[in-house]
Image (cartoon, rainbow, N blue to C red):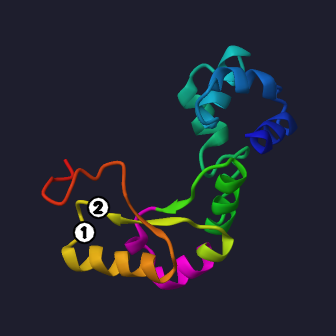
Amino acid sequence: AQGMIAKLRALGIHIEWQRVQEIAGSSSMGRPHIAQAMLEKGYIASIKEAFTKYISRDGPAYVDREKMTPVEAVELILKANGLPVLAHPLTVSDPEIMVSQLKAAGLVGIEAYYGGYTADERNRLINLAERYSLIASGGSDYHGLDASTD
């Protein structure tokens, strides 16, 4: 968000970082909060106008979100005294390589129990967890072997 605010300033639109933080509150700060700050200052007539003219993906003040790598995510979770668990490991092209890299960074578990997995997939993931001395966890939406994911 700070990058967008800097670009907006270069365009003559002066909104304050602190105000954008206040608007966002405890939610993840993003473009809607920047648009609200622009609206409050009278730079635009509507939130939609902020997106159309300035902060859409092809707008002059747009800045891509910073993305962290999976290793950086594991490190951040550990720094916050959390327990990093790889969710949806079957969505990556090679779960074995991903788990190996993340284990070296401090991964403690992988999601092996998920209602959408077949028994075969679940067993593969449990075995993968065992090979790397990881916890085989269930996702927050897992309700047991006989439950649907709905």
Judge left or right: residue 48 versus residue 4: left
Label 1 residue SS? loop
The answer to whether residue 89 is magenta is yes
Question: Which residue extends farthest left?
Answer: 146
Say whether residue 36 is visible: no
Position of residue 72 measured from the top left corner of the image (x, y, whole percent): 69, 63
Label 2 residue SS? loop
Magenta stretch bounds: 87-102
Position of residue 43 measured from the top left corner of the image (x, y, whole percent): 72, 21
Q: At label 1, which amino acid type do we have? A: Tyr
Q: Give yes or no for contact between labels 2 and 1 (Cβ–Cβ under 8 Å).
A: yes
Q: Closer to the camera, 27 or 123? A: 123
Q: Residue at x 28, y 53 (%)?
A: 142
Q: Closer to the camera, 18 or 82? A: 82
Q: CA distance from mark 2 to mark 1?
A: 6 Å
On the image, numbered disc 2 is attached to which residue? 114
Q: Residue at x 73, y 44 (%)?
A: 61
Position of residue 93 measured from the top left corner of the image (x, y, whole percent): 45, 81
Residue 10 vertical placement versus 77 (above, below): above
